[in-house]
Amino acid sequence: MTTTLDASPTTYVGRPRYEGANIRTWIGFKHFTYLLEEAVLQHFRDRGTGPDVLYHVHGLGIEFVETSIQLPATLLVDDEVTAVVTTAPAKPGQGAAFKVRLSVQRDGAEVTILTGKVRVALVAEQDAPGHEPVPVELVPYVVGGVAELETKAREDLACTGEVTDVLTPPGSNAFLWSWRIPYFYCHYSHRLQHSGYTRALEEVVDRFLHERGLGIGKLLEERGWIPVVSRARVQLLADAQMEETLHTVFTVGEIIKDVMYTARMDTYVRRGDVLVHTATASIVHGYAVSRGEKAGSLAEFDADTLTALLGGAE
């Protein structure tokens, strides 16, 4: 028998952050995820098990370990968003599962702007003050660390030489960005959190495109192309610690009808002669045309754009 949280749905109402209105008043994809996180946290708070209580009373940290979202419509900076959170069947060893839907009102009608799936684990925090017994319904979701979750996605890599030789071999079309994990991407004093990976996904796309001559600013100015994300997924596989170097690999997968491309991000921290696989993510990315006869349609990739995305590969 699978133990679940209280199955009654939670409704949360909020607005996107002004920070996310980077191009005109459209909101970028990571702020959809922020709203999704807030809605799930409200689900816990409504049951008396919010992050503060879990940490200070029970010694647990809420960890978003996977989000998978589809974005069928745009979100604007002044939109009021209604989120509905429902529990989903939870597989043993994989955390608590939820479904989330975000919607807004447009011209008197409800419009869905996100459908998503979420998994949450409760990490036993060694430095937390709380030591009271964990509520029985939450016990199945408690782990000592993210690496204890059951997954087939984690693939650690042997590395006795240079990181670049392992992560960006010739012909891979892989782009590598290595960076120090700052404290403001972490939580519970030491661990890189889910939103930090979401920020990294957004930034590695930006860095990759700039390096390939497809910088966001350049395409906005020259072609009026606006970046569009229709799907994104982030999965944590192992803990990455504050101030470790996170080696972030981004690789374009396939081109969809010459208007979208799929891509994958994988992150690693080096510990001795092993690159520990801490997270994996995927994104579906394209562009909308903002001016001219084709305004509002998806931009079609020309030969130069395809070559830049694929690094010359077929």
Image: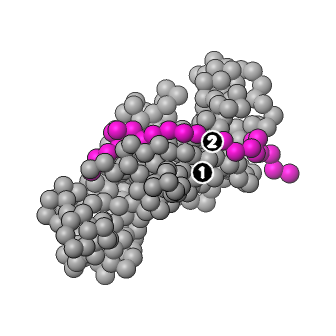
Q: Is residue 21 above or below residue 241?
A: below
Please tell me which residue lies in front, 236 or 295. 295
Please tell me which residue lies in front, 61 or 248. 61
Picture residue at 36% right of the left edge, 71% below the top: 260
**Number of the label disc, if any, that sits on residue 11:** 2
Amino acid at dot 1: Val
**Number of the label disc, if any, that sits on residue 100:** 1
Picture residue at 70% right of the left edge, 38% below the top: 142
Q: Position of residue 270 (x, y in %)?
A: 42, 45
Closer to the eye: label 1 or 2? 2
Q: Is residue 302 above or below residue 275?
A: below
Q: Is residue 300 left or right of residue 167?
A: left
Q: Is residue 35 left or right of residue 170?
A: right
Q: Quadrant of residue 282?
A: bottom left
Can residue 246 be seen from the camera position used here?
A: no
**Number of the label disc, if any, that sits on residue 194:** none
Q: Position of residue 283 (x, y in %)?
A: 42, 61
Quadrant containing the C terminus in the rendered view: bottom left
